[in-house]
Image (tube, helix red, strand yellow):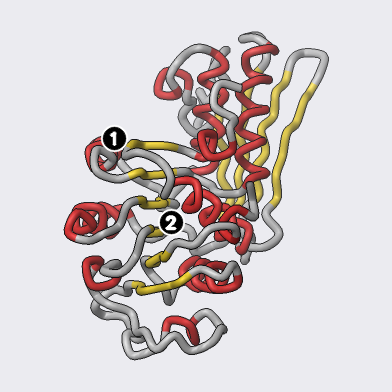
Amino acid sequence: MTDSAGTQSFSVAIAGVAGRMGRQLVGAALDSGLDVTGGSEAPASEHLGSDIGELAGRRLLHLKPATDPVSAAGNADVWIDFTRPAATLAALDSLKHTRVRAAIIGTTGFTPAEEAEIARAANGLAIVKAGNFSVGVNLLQALTRMAAERLGPDWDIEIYETHHRRKVDAPSGTALMLGEAAAEGRGKPLSELRAPPYDGPDAKRRAGNIGFAVRRTGGVIGDHEVSFGSDMELLTLSHTALDRAVFAHGALSAAAWAVQQDPGLYNMNDVLGLSGN
């Protein structure tokens, strides 16, 4: 599945092409032989006059970032967006004025109301939305769900995540994705099981809760760990991202899958055939 972007032809437009993920996405798309037909940047960006291919360290594309999604995605089949919630939602609304058939959303930090907006946008687009596009992380999610179901409520569940100092949302979208998988294994929504941060004189662990711990330091790309603990055993499942390109390649695999689907809201379990596992 991870090489599927290279086995079919479709064109992509990428949001935030001057950002860390935007550059990775452009580079991975070009390396896979895909057409990058546009990209966007904020109106105040210092990179509006730069070539999109050059920003990614690749050949000149003779394309400069646009400031609006309609111009950026005018010739694209797929829109890929790893930016901020407000920008992503504005782009989804604009895409109905383009030929784009599918959208890949790696943006995190949405509110419940914003999640509902994305669901409405999926009435007209095939949207793959994930807190993490790494194949390894999505397998970790499936294993977390399975372990939570098999081990039962007498095992404590704690989720730890570490990211670079510039990440703004916490816990990370990936950590929340793992929490949702654990809660699903327990047969309840995460909103019922999520523990508040352990802080203060009465911060003892409540039985059955799912706890989160967050670290922000240095240039860490992403470390995630799910710990299951009983009085006699400790089981730990973990994943470490070694290269930011892993997320770009996963997003392109999702794009190759999404362009063949009907409108709807999907996730990486659907892409990888892990739904229900």
The location of residue 211, given as percent across then percent down, is 55, 28
Q: Residue at x 51, y 34 (%)?
A: 270
Question: What label does residue 204 carry, if any?
Answer: none
Q: Is residue 42 above or below residue 143?
A: below
- Taking the image as shown, residue 50 lies to the left or right of residue 43, namely right
Tell me the distance, in whole angstroms, between the alpha carbons under discs 1 and 2: 18 Å
Mark 2 neighbour class, 10 Å CA radius: few under 14, some 14 to 19, many 20 or more: few
Query: Looking at numbered disc 2 in the image, what kind of residue is underneath it?
Result: Val
| Residue displayed at 53% across by 30% down | 179
Please name the residue shown 43% across and 81% down the image: 52
Which mark identifies residue 168? Answer: 2
Say which element carries label 1: helix
Would residue 202 be found to the left or right of residue 78 on screen? right
Quarter occupied by residue 36: bottom left
Instruction: Identify the residue position indicated by label 1 in the image.
Output: 112
Mark 1 vs mark 2: which is more N-terminal? 1
Q: Which mark's residue is nearer the viewer, 1 or 2?
A: 1
Rendered position, 130 above or below 100 = above
